[in-house]
Amino acid sequence: MKLVSHRTRSTSAFILVLTLFVVYSASGTSQNPPAQKPTGVLRIRVRVRVDQATKGLSRKRFYLLKGTLEQNKPVLDAAEQRPIVSRDCFYSRLGGSQALIDWLKAGDCESVYCREIDQEFISGPKAVPEFATAYASGEKDFGSTDTGRKWLTNNLPAQLRDGFYQDRRSALQALIKQAEALSGATVLSVMTDRNGTAYFTELEPGAYVLTNLLPVEIGSSVTSWACDVQIKPGDIATEKPYSVSNTKDKNVKCVAVERPLPACVK
């Protein structure tokens, strides 16, 4: 009898534990997951007119600052007050050859890393003196001609290699830090593709400023954008893109401010 009683109590305890587990599991799964806040997407399309041609502005970075133009005025004023030094002037001051300046300009490059250095720019009529010298310096270190060409940037002086890019990068970091301290929100950034299109995703609804922060060179001008953008819950990228340009048009929502490229000061 005692054995039967012990088994009965064990079975009852097991049934009780199993019942509590089922009830707890059911109550847990019946709870709704926390609701996600609705977000929006901003698709920008940047097209610029240069001389008589219109094209997408490729490989240019744009930023979204939290808040309105008025709220971000200190940041935008700081950007505008920064002295403008064109790419040509920057490398000219360093003693860069005209061939190097032309090579950078042809690819709209801020540094020598933006495109591959072909053999024709090391020797022959299109040779860039800085590339030829750097290649010759490292030629003994590489058994392969192709390897020597790909690694020649290591033998270029640092400022000629990417000085212009690093200078702008430092200025952008300072402006971004100022903007984030002002708004308390992260500054978002995207780079346009070859057609001038870019996407900002998962945006909290509210007011933003679309800007490139530092002016870019387009033709013979320096071009800056700073426009109010309102993101609404559920804004999606399949709708009409937010049009950005350096010329006025009924479809353009953000028009640039353009100034002539400053003359080089020696």
Image (cartoon, rainbow, N blue to C red):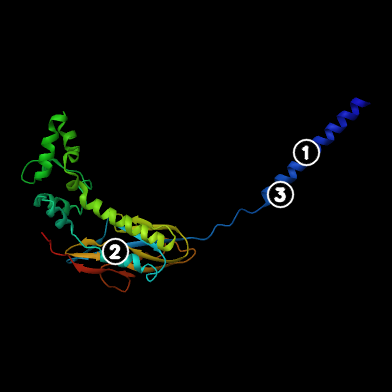
- Marked residue nearer the N-terminal end (2 or 1): 1
Q: Is residue 188 visible?
A: yes
Q: Which residue is mark 2?
A: 79
Residue identified by numbered label 1? 17
Question: Residue farthest to the bottom?
Answer: 250
Q: Are marks 3 and 2 in contact (CB under 8 Å)?
A: no
From where the camera sits, is residue 59 visible?
no
From mark 3 to mark 2, how far is it between C-alphas? 56 Å
Q: Is the C terminus in the top left, top right, bottom left or bottom right quadrant?
A: bottom left
Q: Secondary structure at mark 2?
A: helix
- Quarter assignment of residue 264: bottom left
- Identify the residue shown where x is 84% and y is 36%: 12
Residue 262 appears at what percent x and percent y?
A: 16, 65
Frontmost residue, 241 versus 174: 174
Q: Which residue is mark 3?
A: 27
**Which of the two discs, 1 and 3, labels the residue nearer the N terminus?**
1
- Asked if residue 37 lies left or right of residue 132, the reply is right
Mark-to-mark CA distance, 2 and 1: 67 Å
Instruction: Indicate the position of residue 154 as horizontal and vertical percent values.
Output: 19, 39
- Tell me the kind of residue under disc 1: Val
Residue 183, position in %: x, y?
Answer: 42, 63
Quick one: SS at disc 3?
helix
Instruction: Give the residue type at disc 2.
Output: Ala
